[in-house]
Image: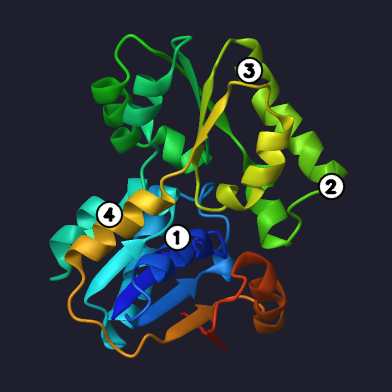
């Protein structure tokens, strides 16, 4: 079974990619919406929360755990790999392909505060973005909008312009979606970008990595837990996971 954890519903973008590549594998997803967003939390608090969820996923029979949250990956994945006898797959901004794709020599990274402040992120930029100017932008409103199921409209457009305007003005021709919530806004973001500006997401690459680690297929079931409001999850699922056949449950965590 493949376990997935996220700070809320954003990781459903990764679940959708995994489902496309591995339709026969059982998946259990935990969205920690009661504690969302992770991007404004302290690293040690994120690590402790991840441990609690990983314990639950382990009890459910997880053989792989996907940290489908950039903030949690930055704060916790290296420690989790030392504490659990399971392979972990995390998220990281696609800095290397963005740097290679840029013609202007300027790239923008849309991410959470926790992701941008982490040492792991700074190592990534130092290793793969030599000779390229990197402009970072925290986008807290994006998480709030996706958690509310607001994927288009004037409020979305205003947030996009606020976050991308300075980056585009600086000459960036590649933008990285550095949070799993953000792909749900990709259509709206692309509509606001000038021609020739590329948008990069990492969900497909994560699904390929999971596929390389996964064992034999199981029953193909999808189970989604939320620590938040179950009715809200069930209302959002047709929009964020169209066609996804899943059973949904409320999960109470200490």
Residue 116 in the image: state x and y as whole percent. 44, 34
**Most foreground residue, 242 or 182:** 242
Task: Indicate the quadrant containing the N terminus: top left, top right, bottom left or bottom right.
Answer: bottom left
Residue receiving disc 1: 14
Going 24% across and 71% down the picture, which residue do you hit? 64
Q: Nearer the viewer, mark 4 or mark 3?
A: 3
Picture quarter containing residue 244?
bottom right
Of marks 1 and 4, which one's residue comes earlier in the chain? 1
Q: Nearer the viewer, mark 4 or mark 2?
A: 2
| Number of residues whose C-alpha sits closer than 10 Å to that of mark 1, classed few (under 14), some (14–19) or many (20 or more) | many
Q: Relative to 244, say whether 209 is above or below.
A: above
Q: Helix, strand, or loop for circle 1?
A: helix
Mark 1 and mark 4 in contact? Answer it, CB < 8 Å. no
Of marks 3 and 2, which one's residue comes earlier in the chain? 2
How many angstroms separate mark 3 from mark 2 (CA)? 21 Å
Q: Relative to 235, say whether 140 is above or below.
A: above
How many angstroms separate mark 4 from mark 3 (CA)? 32 Å
Direction from residue 9 to residue 130 in the image, left or right:
left
Of marks 1 and 2, which one's residue comes earlier in the chain? 1
Going 58% across and 68% down the picture, which residue do you hit? 33
Mark 4 and mark 2 in contact? Answer it, CB < 8 Å. no
Residue receiving disc 3: 168
Residue receiving disc 4: 77
| Number of residues whose C-alpha sits closer than 10 Å to that of mark 4, classed few (under 14), some (14–19) or many (20 or more) | many
Going 43% across and 40% down the picture, which residue do you hit? 115
Mark 1 and mark 2 in contact? Answer it, CB < 8 Å. no
Of marks 4 and 3, which one's residue comes earlier in the chain? 4
Residue 202 in the image: state x and y as whole percent. 41, 46
Residue 87 can be seen in this image: no
Of marks 4 and 2, which one's residue comes earlier in the chain? 4
Of marks 1 and 3, which one's residue comes earlier in the chain? 1
């Amino acid at each position: 079974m493949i376990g997935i954890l996220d700070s809320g519903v954003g990781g459903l973008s990764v679940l959708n990619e995994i489902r496309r590549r591995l339709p026969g594998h059982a998946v259990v997803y935990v969205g920690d919406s009661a504690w969302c967003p992770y991007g404004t939390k302290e690293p040690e608090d994120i690590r402790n929360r991840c441990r609690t969820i990983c314990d639950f996923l382990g009890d459910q029979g997880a053989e792989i755990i996907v940290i489908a949250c950039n903030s949690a990956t930055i704060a916790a994945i290296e420690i989790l790999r030392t504490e659990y006898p399971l392979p972990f797959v995390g998220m990281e901004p696609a800095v290397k392909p963005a740097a290679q794709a840029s013609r202007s020599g300027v790239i923008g990274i849309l991410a959470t505060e926790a992701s941008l402040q982490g040492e792991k992120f700074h190592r990534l930029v130092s290793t793969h973005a030599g000779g390229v100017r990197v402009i970072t932008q925290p986008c807290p409103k994006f998480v709030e909008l996706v958690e509310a199921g607001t994927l288009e409209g004037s409020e979305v457009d205003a947030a996009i312009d606020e976050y991308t305007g300075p980056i585009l003005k600086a000459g960036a021709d590649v933008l990285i979606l550095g949070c799993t919530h953000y792909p749900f806004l990709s259509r709206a973001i692309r509509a606001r970008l000038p021609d020739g500006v590329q948008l990069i997401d990492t969900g497909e690459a994560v699904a390929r990595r999971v596929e390389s680690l996964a064992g034999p297929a199981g029953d193909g079931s999808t189970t989604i837990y939320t620590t938040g409001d179950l009715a809200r999850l069930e209302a959002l699922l047709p929009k964020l996971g169209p066609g996804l056949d899943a059973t949904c449950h409320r999960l109470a965590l200490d």
